[in-house]
Image (cartoon, grey):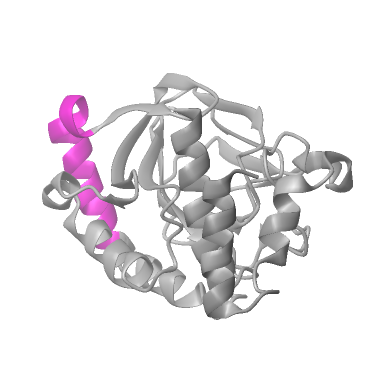
């Protein structure tokens, strides 16, 4: 524990109470053997969050309004995304840079990145940008430590099995454009995307995806706070992870 991190914790405790962020503190010192085997590759697992890989997108009152907003606007989102892909693939899209890899056949158009919206994307995909901002960013449901982007897998592309960084955020997929031959496996359970609807899963569990079809597969990915985290925990997590990243840089 660095003095900077201890100061962060003290400031949060002074506002929310001395027991308000115990799970965050425990996470930093937790024994990796205590986690689910299919979360072994994740860097941080906060205790007390249910070990549930797949979630009902409408099963959490905090997240359901975000799901409804994206699904209700799917037609406009797809239309604008198709135009952006046709007109500006070489400028608006770029190879996705996952913390583990970079793939040319996995393209991304970012709406939120590095802790803030990407204003340049609003001109290309205004509906998705505005829905994200109104229902996830301004409401504090988006985890600002991560991002939101259109994720496009080219024909034949695959995403190798991996765990993402932690379990205190959760990944929402709006299926924007889904050809035949696409799928995703999370913790050993395989599902397909249904165009115009959302999937929700805990990506600290091992997962993989593929496009064996002949067209591009695009989902809009949104990194939301896990609904089982609290406001003081979120405040502490943003400050602590930001400080850890600063130290690592």
In the figure, residue 13 lies in which quadrant?
bottom right
Residue at the right extreme, as displayed: 33
User: Where is residue 59 shown, x and y percent of the image?
Assistant: 62, 75
Position above or below: 147 against 172: above
* Left or right: residue 122 compared with residue 159: left
Establish if 107 lies above or below 195: above
Q: Residue furthest front?
A: 3
Q: Position of residue 128 (x, y in %)?
A: 27, 58
* Quadrant of the frame with the N terminus: top right
Position of residue 164 measured from the top left corner of the image (x, y, whole percent): 61, 39
Residue at the spot x=21%, y=29% of the render?
Answer: 89
Camera-side residue of 130 and 158: 130
Asked if residue 88 lies in the magenta stretch, the reply is: yes
Left or right: residue 210 compared with residue 28: left
Q: Is residue 194 visible?
A: no
Please tell me whether residue 185 belongs to the stretch shown in magenta. Answer: no
Q: Which residues are magenta?
A: 75-92
**Quadrant position of residue 135:** bottom left
Residue 103 as seen in the image, left or right of residue 32: left
What x and y, as percent, mark residue 56?
Answer: 63, 68
Which is nearer the eye, 40 or 249? 249
Quadrant of the rendering where the C terminus is positioned: top left
* Residue sitting at x 67%, y 74%: 18
Kindly tell me whether residue 85 is visible in this rendering.
yes
Main secondary structure of the magenta stretch: helix
């Amino acid at each position: 524990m660095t003095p900077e991190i201890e100061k962060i914790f003290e400031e949060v405790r002074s506002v929310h109470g001395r027991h308000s962020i115990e799970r965050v503190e425990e996470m930093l010192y937790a024994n990796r053997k205590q986690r689910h085997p299919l979360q072994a590759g994740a860097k941080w697992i906060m205790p007390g969050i249910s070990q549930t890989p797949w979630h009902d997108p409408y099963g959490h009152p905090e997240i359901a309004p975000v799901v409804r907003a994206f699904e209700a606007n799917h037609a406009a989102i797809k239309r604008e995304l198709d135009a952006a892909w046709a007109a500006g693939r070489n400028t608006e899209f770029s190879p996705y840079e996952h913390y583990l890899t970079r793939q040319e056949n996995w393209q991304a158009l970012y709406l939120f990145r590095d802790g803030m919206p990407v204003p340049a994307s609003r001109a290309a995909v205004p509906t998705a940008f505005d829905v994200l901002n109104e229902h996830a960013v301004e409401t504090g449901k988006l985890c600002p430590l991560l991002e939101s982007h259109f994720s496009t897998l080219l024909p034949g592309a695959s995403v190798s099995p991996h765990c993402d960084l932690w379990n205190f955020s959760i990944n929402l997929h709006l299926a924007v454009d889904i050809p035949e031959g696409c799928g995703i496996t999370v913790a050993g359970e395989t599902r397909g995307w249904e165009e115009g609807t959302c999937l929700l899963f805990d990506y600290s569990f091992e997962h993989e995806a593929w496009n064996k079809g002949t067209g591009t597969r695009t989902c809009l990915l949104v990194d939301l706070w896990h609904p089982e985290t609290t406001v003081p925990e979120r405040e502490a997590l943003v400050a602590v992870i930001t400080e850890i990243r600063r130290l690592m840089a």
